[in-house]
Amino acid sequence: MIKDELKTVIQEKTACVGVIGLGYVGLPLIVEFGLKGFRGIGFEVDTKKVDDVNSGRSYIVDVPDENLKKCVDGGLLTATTDFSQLTECDVIIICVPTPLRKTKDPDMSYIIAAGEEIQKYMRRGQLMILESTTYPGTTDEVLQPMFEENGLKLDEDFLLAFSPERVDPGNPQYLTHNIPKVVGGVSKDSTEIAAMLYGEIVEQVHAVSSARVAEACKLWENTFRAINIGMANEMAKVCNALGIDSWEVVQAAATKPFGFMAFYPGPGIGGHCIPLDPHYLSWKARQHGFDSQFISLAEQVNSGMPAYVVKLVSTALNNEKKAVNGSKILILGVAYKKDIDDMRESPALSIIDLLRARGADVMYHDPFVAEVTFDHAYTIGEAEPLYNNELTDELISDSDCVVICTEHSNVDYNRVCQLAGLIVDTRNALSTDIRNGSKANIVRL
Ligand SMILES: NC(=O)c1ccc[n+]([C@@H]2O[C@H](COP(=O)([O-])OP(=O)(O)OC[C@H]3O[C@@H](n4cnc5c(N)ncnc54)[C@H](O)[C@@H]3O)[C@@H](O)[C@H]2O)c1
């Protein structure tokens, strides 16, 4: 039986693991398999990533070069653009992007493209796992029929499962091996073997009854975050209107040891997950006649935050008898979150765009991001790219306003507070001590 064959190669660690898409999710995953003694083949369309992997150069913050090199030098990891090597794999894991179309509908083209490559080269005896975040039903409605088109049958010839990725880039405490993994197969055998496989690389596997439960679980987690961040943003606006420090309020509330979980306000949500994933769920729900109101409301509040930050900047400048038009504004941190280089959906992009559209002279400093481009369809201000500036004393003191959009740890906020005249802190990056010792006018979200 195919189940027993796969069990044997996993137990003996002779299974070859193919990963399609070597990005923030796929690279840490394939390296983890390599570190545990499994041979891996990474399939990528980006030739630079293929070259980097094969040279042992990591481009993902959570994957140290040393670990990557260990796998490559030990003959346990190669990357390729040649999908015919999929035939060599006993397990194929799909980790490609799942963006949204302009209409905010799911863009399934990457999953379909990966599925088509598998379709061309699949053979009897393989386990396929989808890890890309997607709407419930993708694994059994989209992938299963594709894989059965060639005459191969589920359970007899191949197994198929979904397992959501929960990687948190830049979080050194939780890495692939110690984040519990949820696994749901489209058949019982698929669940059992996929759970067994992940048990080789993660400490805790939680098997569920179907791929749809696993798909919905991921969307539930990320929708929970989107809605709670939306609530924190709304509360920050309420506190602001009442003249109360929202950060002090939420920190006080967080001392409650039960029944409260702290979420913090910010300049908006970014990354490839929180701003996008809830739309996958609401899109699917709409097809079944259900309109998810919480998701829409959170989206409305969160996507309005960049404009709210621009309003704070504009009011703060106005109080100093200055206009946004012609002011020098320094953005500190442009990545969507602390201590990483990921710019996807970063709210800093909208803030910069809105400020430039109002005539501001915007510069930025971000130790992780060398260049920011504005070639997306929604740009309303200048489209010229911006480049990272060294955080010199002159840059800070010449700025009419410093806007902290991302609170990277390796920025000297004390120096910023000594040299700047006006600071808008959207992330609570400035501690009470730093604020108390500063002469700058500080506005907090
Ligand atoms: N980044 C995160 O923190 C995170 C966390 C959990 C889940 N996810 C989900 O995981 C999936 C992957 O996200 P990511 O952040 O790794 O994306 P990414 O953009 O960093 O990586 C995806 C990779 O897939 C490659 N690719 C695209 N099409 C391909 C194809 N047809 N064949 C081979 N390679 C292809 C791209 O070149 C890219 O390197 C998404 O569904 C995302 O929602 C991401």
Image (spheres, rainbow, N blue to C red):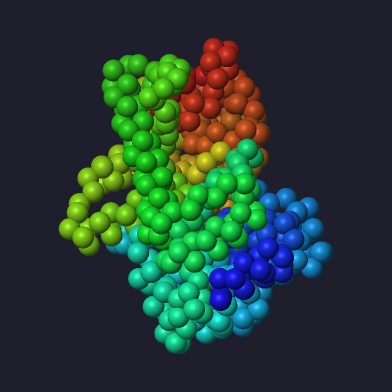
Residue 390 versus residue 444: which sits nearer the camera? Answer: 444
Identified at 37% across, 59% down, the residue is 212
Which image quarter holds the N terminus? bottom right
Position above or below: 278 against 119? above
Residue 221 versus residue 408: which sits nearer the camera? Answer: 221
**Which residue in the rendered view is the most extreme toward the right?**
73
Q: How many marks are shown on the rendered structure?
A: 0
Residue 50 versus residue 437: which sits nearer the camera? Answer: 50
Position above or below: 359 against 418? below
> Where residue 351 sits: x, y (%)?
42, 42
From the viewer's perspective, tell me whether residue 395 is left or right of residue 14.
left
Residue 211 versus residue 276: which sits nearer the camera? Answer: 211
From the viewer's perspective, tell me whether residue 194 is left or right of residue 306.
right
From the viewer's perspective, tell me whether residue 138 is left or right of residue 175.
left
Which image quarter holds the C terminus? top left
> Where residue 59 sits: x, y (%)?
66, 56
